[in-house]
Amino acid sequence: MATAASRRTAMVADRRPLERGLARFLLEERGLFVVGEAATMADVLLRVQQLKPDIVVLHEKLALDHDPTVIAQIRRISPHTSIVLLAADRNALPSELVLLADAVVEDGPGLTELGTAVAGPETATAAAEAASDATAEAASEIGVATAGAAAVASPKRSAGSSPSSRRRSTERRHASRTRPSAASTRRSSSRARSRRSVSRASSRSRSRSSSARPRAR
């Protein structure tokens, strides 16, 4: 675990205790070491002079209650300190205050953006690379799962045929062997017609022979 000396430091300046606590939590979640809090502008300037933090999270109310150049005063005391301004509406801030701050984060639900705003370049790059790796890994897993589902849905016929399918195939082959062909049926019908023709001819011949024989007196 990184020591306090090697971690980036931050200070939270806000009149509202609950919001100070939330900002501290978000900063510490990003790995920053919160070295102090302040509820008045006088405390801010004093603590910045003493602690020289890397970041000061400053609520707009403290800055607006004083000369907006208070941010310039913080920079004169500690030139390397970055200033993140918390505001209810960034569009409603005086332009000179926005220009003097390094970043503006909207208060309320938007306060969760504070962690991104204070992330250093290395942290942001590492987060982007981690997100890219996670996306590539998820895409790879989806591709493998899709291929597996396709293989299950379309098995090879030789290996995936069910017993009922094999039984129906056997019955069809047996029926094709036992069912007479069309040619065989035609030959049988022709032979039957020939036999009937011969039988009729014989009957007529016997009838004529009987009629030609003289009657006995």
Image (tube, rainbow, N blue to C red):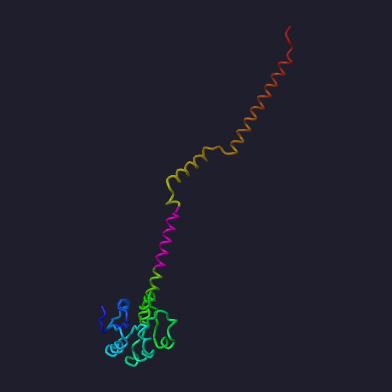
Q: Is residue 28 visible?
A: no
Q: Quadrant of the N terminus?
A: bottom left
Residue 41, position in %: x, y? 32, 87
Closer-to-camera residue (63/146): 63
Q: Main secondary structure of the magenta part?
A: helix
Residue 177, position in %: x, y? 51, 39
Residue 85, position in %: x, y? 37, 83
Residue 149, position in %: x, y? 42, 58
- The part of the image, by quadrant, that contains residue 67 is bottom left
205 over 176 or under it: above or below: above
Q: Does the magenta stretch include residue 160?
A: no
What range is drawn magenta here? 138-156
Q: In which quarter of the image is the C terminus?
A: top right
Q: In this view, does 58 lie to the left or right of 170?
A: left
131 over 13 or under it: above or below: above
Which residue shows up at 41% across the image and 67% down it?
140
Which residue shows up at 32% across the image and 92% down it?
77
25 over 170 or under it: above or below: below
Q: Is residue 217 left or right of residue 134?
A: right
